[in-house]
Amino acid sequence: MTNLRIGVMYDRDWAPEGLPGFARQAEALGVDDLWVVEDLGWNGGVSAAAVALGATERLRVGIGITPAPLRSPALLAMELATLARVFPGRLVAGIGHGVREWMVSVGVAPSSPLALLEETITSVRALLRGERVELAGREVRLDGIQLVHPPAEVPPVVAGVVRSRSLELSGRVADGTLIAEGHGPRDLENTRALTAKGGATADHTLTVLSFCCVGEDPDQVARTLHPVTEGHGTWLGRPQDEVFTVSGRPAQAAAHVRELAAAGADTVVLRVIGPEPLDQLKAVLGALGR
């Protein structure tokens, strides 16, 4: 628990012009990370990360996640390298499959999502290390590409994935795994097992996104969370009451964070639901002794 990082998400529904101020206030509260989102039709993840990094001094900023089908690995590596050189040690790059229906809607759905993700993560990591990359894969082709300005401090590349085969892939090719909202301690134990099966070593990190709603009125908290957990339960294919959240009174929310840490989370990123998100964040941090 002493090494656990606490982060906060800048929700995709919040207007992008509010990001600089939110990032500065979150930094002042003492969080370790701020994570931005790249969902089709909302905001650009790389540009949002640049805004958050430029507005703050020490926060680590995570991109959760760039959909591999939307971006050339060469261009993605160029973008990440630029941020990593200007803001060394402050970037985490999340890459995932993207929502299949969204990828179909813009004509970029791959024939093999697993191959595309593996080839993208592998080539992006190699390019960020300054290597010259030759790859004639199932989904990615790179003909002797090399970055002129690779970062001196290579940012970690994590895979934002859910399903078993993808979790094994993450353990094999990524620096860490980013777990979507709704997954609880038991899920994390399964995730650790699957990434280890893929070859993950002890330094493979687990970053967990979690819905967060904090208040003194449990009925109000439940009402606020209900539409969110209902829809997310459908997406996860599990009953609504099995969608894990960091919620309740501040001490209860802090206890849920500690449960995630005990199950193997290295970073817990709070996606705050409801009014006054920074006040809710402050309450959780206070209950955690931060």
Image (cartoon, rainbow, N blue to C red):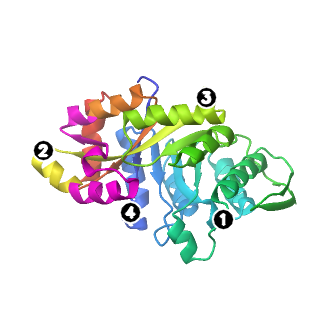
Residue 286 location, quadrant: top left
Residues at discs 3 and 1 in contact (Cβ within 8 Å): no
**Residue 162 position within the rendered picture, expressed as x and y whole percent measured from the top left:** 50, 48
Read off the magenta span. 226-253
Label of residue 18 in the image = 4
Q: Amino acid at mark 3?
A: Asp
Q: Which residue is mark 3?
A: 203
Seen as rendered, the residue at the extreme bottom is 106
**Residue 54 position within the rendered picture, expressed as x and y whole percent measured from the top left:** 54, 54
**Distance between the Cα atoms at labels 4 and 1?**
26 Å
Query: What secondary structure characterizes most of the magenta part?
Result: helix
111 versus 10 height, above or below = below
Q: Amino acid at mark 2?
A: Pro
Q: Amino acid at mark 1?
A: Arg
**Distance between the Cα atoms at labels 3 and 2?**
38 Å
Residue 2 location, quadrant: top left
Q: Residues within 10 Å of mark 2 (few under 14, many from 20)?
A: some
**Residue 73 position within the rendered picture, expressed as x and y whole percent measured from the top left:** 72, 59
Label of residue 218 in the image = 2
Q: Which quadrant is the C terminus positioned in?
A: top left
Q: Nearer the viewer, mark 4 or mark 1?
A: 1
Q: Residue at x 87, y 51 (%)?
A: 132
Q: Earlier in the sequence, mark 4 or mark 3?
A: 4
